[in-house]
Amino acid sequence: MSATLEAPAPQVIDVGGRRLAAWCSGTGSPAGFIEPGLAAPGTQGAGVQQGIAAFTRCCRYDRAGLGASEPAPAPRTLDELVGDLHALLHQPGMREGPCVLVGHSLGGLLVRLYAHRHPKDVAALVLVDSMHEQQFERLAPAFPPEGAADSPMLRGMRAFWQHGWEDPAQNGEALDLPASSAQLPGDGSLGELPMLVLSAPAFDDRKLFPAPHGERLARGWLALQQRLLRLSCRSEHVALESGSGHFVHRDQPAQVVQAVQRVVSKLRGLTPA
């Protein structure tokens, strides 16, 4: 699948004194709208957008301060990101009716909060290896203890998961993650909203995470992915067994496209492809 599909220039949309860049393609309803992970520009969703645009309208964008979008005052919280997305989705011509929000990693937290704040805008959610608001507290203790042979990557990940996540200056998007996590409602908060949870075998790098730490982290991550199913009584879990790490949209974009197509087909009353 090609990794590029965009107009020569993005749509530039004012969201209250700041401009965000967005790219849309395809036709049809319900439209898909892609929310990338923490500090990730919208270009990371270009390949997935191309696939979704083959069967319905699909848009992606750069959040404030990323890619071609103007910055916003920092630090920020999910509430403020939801406000930007709401302004974007209510621009003329952006969509027709409720849309399918597709959130990867941090984007999963964002689309969840959006669906809670603005349920009439949302037809369904697709969570792609989504972050969970309790992940740092639950999984940080499972990281391997410090050792002389630790790689720089492991050292950096351990530092971020144990303490760095609390500092907005360390996450590349000036996001206050502790405050944002507190804004998310708990189990059952999405009622009957259709939701598909697509999860990858995270922490599966045996060289980076030696046994038994990697296995413990992987089990903990899967448990949090399964806990997301409690958010809605109409939830479904699709677990990828291999071939993809956390960045599913990069490693296996077709899997994300198929998940969205499955949801869109159900909403249209069709048999999923």
Image (tube, helix red, strand yellow):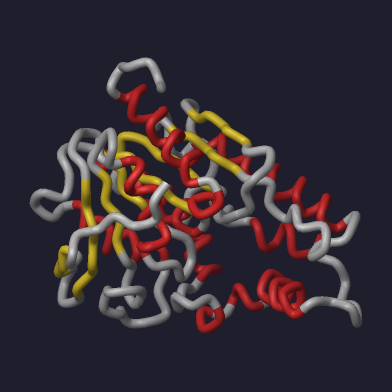
The answer to which image quadrant residue 97 occupies is top left
**Residue in front for this viewpoint, 133 or 146:** 146
Left or right: residue 144 versus residue 191 is right
Residue depicted at 75% across the width and 80% down the height = 152
| Residue lying at the far front of the rendered structure | 2
**Residue in front for this viewpoint, 222 or 176:** 222
Q: Position of residue 9 (x, y in %)?
A: 18, 67
Is residue 208 shown above or below 76? above
Is residue 21 shown above or below 215? below
Residue depicted at 46% across the width and 40% down the height = 189
Residue depicted at 65% across the width and 57% down the height = 135
Number of numbered callouts drawn = 0
Quadrant in the picture for the C terminus: top left
Left or right: residue 133 versus residue 58 is right
Q: Position of residue 127 (x, y in %)?
A: 48, 44
Left or right: residue 258 versus residue 52 is right
Residue depicted at 55% across the width and 55% down the height = 247
Q: Position of residue 79 (x, y in %)?
A: 37, 62
Q: Position of residue 211 (x, y in %)?
A: 90, 56
The answer to which image quadrant residue 62 occupies is bottom left
**Residue in front for this viewpoint, 149 or 118:** 149
Is residue 123 shown above or below 89? above
Is residue 54 shown above or below 168? above
